[in-house]
Amino acid sequence: MSQPNDSQLQPEAEGLPFPSVRDVPATSPLRWLARGFSDLRACPIPSLFYGFCFAGMGLLITLVFEHAYEYTSALTSGFLLLGPFLAMGLYELSRRKELGEPCALLPTLMVWKRNAGNLGIFAVVLGVIFLVWARASLIVFALFYTSELPNLSGFLEQILAMENLEFLLVYFGVGLLFATIVFAVSVVSIPLMLDRNQDAITAMLASIGALARNPGAMLVWAAFIVGLTVLGFLTFHVGLVVLMPLIGHATWHAYRDIVAPEASR
């Protein structure tokens, strides 16, 4: 099936049908990652540019807040919460490859202009969730962290040694709640807004519907995202250079697989 060109990707938001969500098997994330890797190989330079941006931001957070680990953990987690918004350029690269267009970096830097208003609304939603999470993270530290206050490396050592187990259970439990909320509203929402000029509310509702209709595939996909991201951080952010673009490209293919194409109008 031929894909729409840029002029067809800018309809008026009013009157757009609600996106139709399809059932996908639980093994689908493997296919999404394979297609994402294909996009990464086809567009290596612009893809790795975004990968270096992710790695650079993570490294900057770690260096600036090395001796304030309670802020580092909150900001690093919040950085991941905002990941879907930061990966817009990667979605656009996959879309351009799909249409047979050149893998140029410059057009992807301005892709937000295609649906700036609704992307702005979505950014505000993620920003509010991030701020609430950052505050909740500090509260959990204040109430449950009882060990001596080390620097970041010492804090990570305590986590790996499973010290202060009560704190770890509460902290990761609260973090899981916020991560689930963000995952639910963002799993296909930004690709949907970029591809169809969909409004933010409808896109988020469709994303929640995708999670509700495909819990198996979404659970596997979330596990891949978390696992690859943790792997990237364990390599002192170097792995993020490749792994973040891989996840971004794969997310575009997840959207294509889960959301049915628009009916002819």
Image (tube, helix red, strand yellow):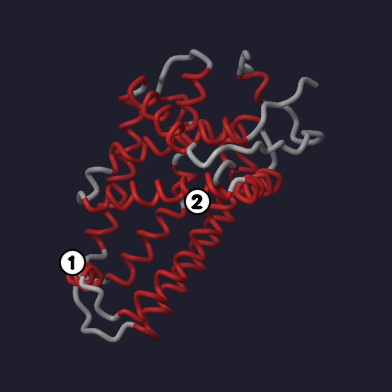
Front residue of 143/134: it is 143
Residue 38 lies in what quarter of the image?
top left
Which amino acid, by three-letter code, is at mark 1? Ser
Quadrant of the image for the N terminus?
top right
Q: Quadrant of the C terminus?
A: top right
Q: Is residue 202 above or below residue 194?
A: below
Judged by depth in the image, the label closer to the viewer, 1 or 2, is 2
Q: Is residue 105 left or right of residue 111?
A: left
Q: Is residue 37 left or right of residue 232?
A: right
Q: Residues within 10 Å of mark 1 (few under 14, many from 20)?
A: few
Please report whichever mark, 1 or 2, sits nearer to the chain's N-terminal start. 1
Image coordinates of residue 229 in percent, x first then y, are 34, 49
* Amino acid beneath label 2: Leu
x and y percent of residue 93 in the render?
45, 26
The residue depicted at 24 percent of the width and 48 percent of the height is 237
Above or below 144: residue 254: above
Q: Nearer the viewer, residue 116 or 85?
A: 85
Residue depicted at 40% across the width and 46% down the height = 224
- As measured in the structure, the alpha-carbon distance from the residue carrying label 1 to the one carrying label 2 is 30 Å
- Which label belongs to residue 206? none
Q: Position of residue 23 (x, y in %)?
A: 63, 38
Residue at which label 1 appears: 153
Label 2 belongs to which residue?
219
Q: Quadrant of the rendered structure where residue 160 is? A: bottom left
**Image location (x, y in percent) of residue 219:** 50, 51
